[in-house]
Image (cartoon, rainbow, N blue to C red):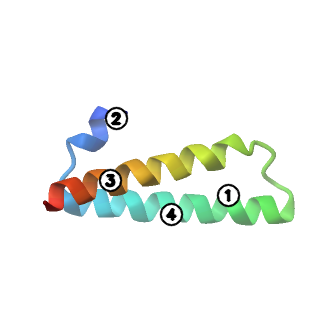
Amino acid sequence: MIPEEIKKKNTVELREVVQSLKKEYFDLKMGLAIGQVTDFSQMRKVRVKIAQALTLLNMKKK
């Protein structure tokens, strides 16, 4: 399910959300590489949020 707060955003805001989530995912990957991240499920949650936001963005384009 796509959260209601994301559904209400327009395309510009969705792009910003995707960009910030990708940065967060990158930071988690770097943290994993140097041993700071111990909760691997957090990475999956961020990936799912990115996919949901991109799906909604593509739906709004059509």
Mark 2 sits on what residue?
A: 3
- Residue 49: horizontal and vertical position, in percent? 46, 47
Q: What is the distance, in whole Å, between disc 3 and disc 1 at their CAs?
A: 22 Å
Report which residue position mark 3 lands on.
55
Residue for point 26% across, 57% down? 57
Mark 1 or 4, nearer chain start: 4
The C terminus: image quadrant? bottom left
How much space separates mark 1 and mark 2, taking CA atoms? Answer: 22 Å
Disc 4 crowd, CA 10 A, few/some/many (<14, 14-19, 20+): some
Q: Which residue is mark 1?
A: 28
- The residue carrying mark 4 is 22
Image x and y of residue 20, in percent: 45, 61
**Label 2 is placed on what type of residue?**
Pro
Sequence order check, earlier mark of 1 and 2? 2
Q: Is residue 2 above or below residue 54?
A: above
Label located before the other in sequence (2 or 3): 2
Crowd rating for badge 3 (residues with CA inside 10 Å; few <14, some 14–19, many 20+): few
Q: Disc 4, disc 2: CB below 8 Å?
A: no
Is label 1 in a helix, a strand or a loop? helix
Nearer to us of marks 3 and 4 is 3
Label located before the other in sequence (4 or 2) = 2
